[in-house]
Every structure is written in C-alpha cells, then in structure tokens.
Amino acid sequence: MSSLAFRRFTHAYALREVDSAALLELLRPHAAFLASHGAVLPTDPEQIDIERVEIALLTTIGDLPIDLVDALWHIHEMATPAGMESLLSAAEQTGLRLPGDRLAPADIAVRVWIADADLLRRCHSELSVSRRRSFETFVPAKGASLAWVPPGPETIAALDAAVGAWYVANRRGLGARVLFFDHGDELRFLIRHGGPYRREGSLDDGMPGCVRYRPMAHGIVVFDRRTWELRINSGTKRERIAYRELVGQHVFGRREMFPPDPDRYDLEPLRALGRRSLVCTDVPGLASVRLTELSLYVGGPYHRRKVEKADDVLVALDAAGETISSDALLTSATFEVRFTDGRKPRPVTIRHGNTASYTRDTDAEIIETFLRRRGFVKGVREVAHAALASA
C-alpha cells in the first residue's frame, strides 16, 4: 500500500475553511508526520501556519498517512450546505453535541469526524455528494519537439504573471497565483484565483445585511512526463483554453503545444472485447473494474439515444444473450472501480472525446494506465489488443 501514488491530497486549500481549534485537533495525531515535512503544529490554534500545512500535504508523494487522506477527503466532501444539513440531522439523532452556533459547514464536518468518523462516512454515502472532477486531456502537437527542460523559478514566475493578468482581464480580480509541485513523473500546477464577485444577503445575530466578497477558486493542470499528456480541470471552458495555452507558451515554449484534441478516448474496446476489456490484473493499484452504465447514440431522424444501466452491464448483456449494438456510437461509459486500498469502489466516467471524470483527481494516474493498457486511448489500441490476445 505504501507504494501507491494516489496517496496524495489535492484539496489542501480547503483547510482554510476550518476553525483553527478544530483543525489543530484534527491534525494533532499526525503532528510527527507534518513536522517531518516542515509543518510544526503549535499549542495555540491561532498560531497554526496553514500555508506550511498546505505545502506539506500538496508536496508529499506516496507516504501521506492514509487515515489523514481519508479524513481530509471525507471532510472536504461534506463541507457543503447539503452536507452540513445531513450531519446536523445525524448529530441530533445520535445525541452528538456540537459547540456554538457560528460553525461553518467545514467546522461541522471536522467536529463530527473527530467525534464519530463512521457517522460522517454513513452520511456521505447516503447523501452521495461525491464531487467528480472532470479532466480534459491533451497531447503534444504533431511534429512538436519532446525535449524536456524542467521549469525553473523564472519560468514559473512568468507563468504566474501571465495567469494573473488573464484573471484580471477577465474580471476575476487581483491575486491569482500558480503553485508548482514537482512529483517526479507528474508536474502539478495548482492555480489559485478569484471567482466572479458576489453579493449575498446575510443574517448576523438576527440582523439582515449584505456580504460582498470575491470567492477563492482553484484549477489544476497536470503534466505527465511519461506520456507527455496534459490534464486540465477548471471551472469554465475559457479557463481551460487559457491554462492549455499559457502552460504551453511558458513551460514548453509553444502556445499551441497542446492543441484541442476531441478524439482521445474511444470506447470501442467494450464492444470488441467485452468483459476482457476490463481486465486490470496488470495495473498496480486496481482490484477490479465493472461497467455500470453505457450511453449509446443510435441516431436516425429522431436522434435516438439509449442508456444501459446495471450492476454489471456486460454480465447483464451476456445473461440476456445480448451484445452491445453494432450500429451505435458509444458516447460515455461509467465504471465502478475498486482500488487495492480496500475502501469502497469509486465511479469513473469516460466520454467519447477527451473528458474523464473522477471522484478523486489523484485516481487519474492509475485509471489512465488502465485505459491505455486496454486500448481506450487512441493510438495504443492495437498494442493493447495484441497483449490481451497473447495473454
């Protein structure tokens, strides 16, 4: 388990939403680990250095305590108004007392986790609030030089300035930053920026008012040095274009280094190989993969679409003596993926084109390995089919 690369947490910035006293209590069991990575926990909650804790979590590869990852991920998932409502109801039913009334959703999630982690897990399962993160993947332009030069401080500074200027020009305010993390085979650019300005009605101590603020938001760009693929997660289409072009320009010296690629993923192996297309015994970190939903475009004058849904679509089709329709375009597939960490399976959705959605963005590395080996990524299908034929 200690060798699995997905033991990493990429939502460290969410720690700023948590009350410092509750956060310190949550992190205290992992004080030695954090100290070994440069984040020494104080005795006074007000003295906690969030920036150092964030850096420790974002830069650690592989050896992040899985209990800490599990806690942070579940807390992040439930730190929403809907999650807060679910947790408050569960706390009332179980007699769990929560201090004070000035608790943000993240505070409540932390307090419930500390008191009864299983209760929060149950609420999470019932609420099904897993936030899938959609990544679009791009490959280098044909004929582009693939000579790799690690980005130095000046390169990152230039990228930081360009990203900041883009957000100012697009009415998102000052202060956008690019945080760079070198994870060896993967380079991660965490873009911290402002969102559109907001005005919201408020109620403070019974008095109505108005709160004006610019929320903080984040985007992620991941470059895989092994495959030369660029994965991007962002809030809007224009942001994705900006990230792709600015990273290309400043890190690779070519603005169109990663041109739009509408045809990266292909679901044809499901039809060609059936259940054999989901073999994952050769992918470290994966225990099993099942197809739970398949969308098909049949077309015709009425633009007909079909959706197959089952606990295991391929097994269900076999049992019914049916096959995947040969005259339909396979437009999207949702898989139930179980990892060897033994925890509950997680959904992954692949769409015909270049979009993949994960519950946890750090699942991407393992899932992409599986997709390449089974031929779901164009350009490697023939190799994958040959490997299965000889197995």
Image (tube, rainbow, N blue to C red):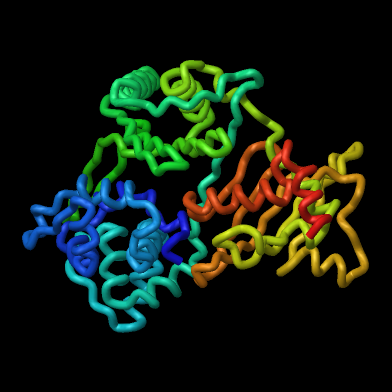
Q: Position of residue 164 (x, y in %)?
A: 33, 23
In the picture, measured across the screen, residue 356 lies left or right of residue 390, that is left
| Quadrant, the C terminus | bottom right
In the picture, measured across the screen, residue 69 lies left or right of residue 358, that is left
- Asked whether the viewer can see residue 81, the reply is no
Q: Say if 206 sits above or below 263 in the image.
A: below
Q: Give the farthest residue toward the front.
A: 390
In the picture, measured across the screen, residue 118 lies left or right of residue 274, that is left
Q: Position of residue 17 (x, y in %)?
A: 26, 52
- Asked whether the viewer can see residue 363, the reply is yes
Identify the residue shown where x is 84% and y is 52%: 271
Identify the residue shown where x is 85% and y is 65%: 317
The residue closer to the viewer here, 59 or 179, is 59
The number of discs equals: 0
The image quarter containing residue 77 is bottom left
The image quarter containing residue 338 is bottom right
In the picture, measured across the screen, residue 149 lies left or right of residue 175, that is right
Q: Say if 302 sits above or below 80 in the image.
A: above
Q: Give the farthest residue toward the left.
A: 44
Identify the residue shown where x is 71% and y is 48%: 332
Q: Position of residue 186 (x, y in %)?
A: 46, 41
Identify the residue shown where x is 73% and y is 36%: 379
The residue closer to the viewer here, 160 or 87, is 160
The residue closer to the viewer here, 324 or 259, is 259
Q: Position of residue 132 (x, y in %)?
A: 52, 52
